[in-house]
Image: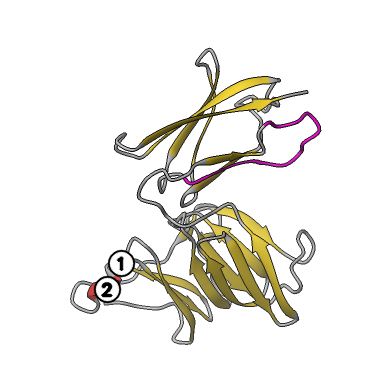
């Protein structure tokens, strides 16, 4: 039968794969086929971190939000966590010590899919954070690569917006040598301008090849790195 780690529920969030994420006093449970509840929901599953066991065991989970890249944002009394789509890997952990977060007690989350802005409510006020995500698009639309050109003293990320949702991107030099591959979060992707060997991209022209999982929806763009 379906079960929860605790009967005290603080938040629920339905993701694009029809999984219902439930935040409780003692961690997280996930129900598959949530829109067919209760007919086809036989039991919940508890996401597991490979290293530490059940996700947020014995932690109060105040809020959960799923972004256009299917990642999960989880607010607790010990900060804000960013997880991969299945909840099996922690991508980031924001606290007052390593981020502008006003408090480690995160009470609520709202994600603006169109802009990638996340509004974070804490017990000490509200703050917003611009994440590397955007609304899911069914095709490539007005794709932009920025900054372009990338100047030598630039230390931020290269951004690519307007991609088909969950795009697979390859970045190559003009000779066709692949130097990086990534996937978009929703319809936005970023690159830290470092190749597989963690070497910064040399000055030159680079190509961006983007496709959906079926290889039907494609895009080719270019950008320059200058001294």
**Is residue 160 covered in magenta?**
yes
Residue 5, quarter of picture = bottom left
- Residue 32's label in the rendered image is 1
Nearer to us in this view, 36 or 69 = 69
**Residue furthest toward the bottom?**
8
Q: Is residue 192 left or right of residue 15?
A: right
- Furthest residue toward front: 142
Instruction: Residue at 53% x, 12% y: name it.
Output: 175
Say few, some or many: other residues with alpha carbon within 10 Å of mark 2 (under 14 / 14 to 19 / 20 or more): some
Q: Which residue is mark 2?
A: 35
Left or right: where does residue 148 sit relative to residue 53?
Answer: right
| Residue closest to the eye, 207 or 94 | 207
The quadrant of the image that shows the C terminus is: top right
Task: State which mark lies toward you, 1 or 2.
Answer: 2
- Considering the whole magenta stretch, tell me its main secondary structure: loop
Q: Quadrant of residue 102?
A: bottom right
Q: Are marks 1 and 2 in contact (CB under 8 Å)?
A: no
Residue 171: x and y in percent read: 53, 28
- Residue 66 tag number: none
Task: Please report the bounds of the magenta region as a residue range.
Answer: 149-162
Q: Residue at x 41, y 66 (%)?
A: 46
**The N terminus - image quarter:** bottom left
Q: Residue at x 66, y 30 (%)?
A: 194
Q: Is residue 56 visible?
A: no
């Amino acid at each position: 039968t379906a079960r929860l780690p605790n009967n005290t529920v603080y938040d629920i969030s339905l993701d694009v794969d029809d999984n219902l994420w439930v935040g409780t006093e003692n961690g997280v449970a996930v129900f598959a086929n949530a829109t067919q509840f209760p007919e086809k929901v036989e039991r919940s599953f508890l996401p597991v971190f490979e290293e530490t066991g059940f996700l947020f065991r014995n932690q109060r989970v105040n809020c959960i939000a799923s972004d256009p890249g299917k990642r999960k944002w989880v607010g607790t009394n010990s900060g804000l966590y960013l997880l991969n789509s299945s909840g099996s890997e922690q991508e980031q952990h924001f606290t007052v010590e390593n981020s502008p977060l006003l408090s480690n007690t995160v009470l609520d989350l709202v994600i603006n899919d169109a802009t990638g802005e996340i509004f974070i409510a804490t017990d000490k006020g509200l703050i917003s954070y611009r994440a590397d995500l955007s609304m899911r698009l069914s095709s490539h639309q007005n794709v932009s690569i920025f900054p372009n050109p990338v100047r030598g003293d630039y230390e931020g990320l290269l951004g690519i917006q307007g991609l088909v949702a969950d795009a697979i991107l390859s970045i190559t030099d003009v000779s066709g040598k692949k130097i990086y591959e990534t996937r978009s979060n929703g319809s936005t992707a970023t690159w830290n301008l470092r190749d597989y060997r963690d070497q910064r991209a040399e000055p030159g022209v680079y190509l961006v090849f983007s496709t959906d999982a079926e290889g039907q929806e494609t895009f080719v763009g270019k950008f320059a790195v200058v001294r």
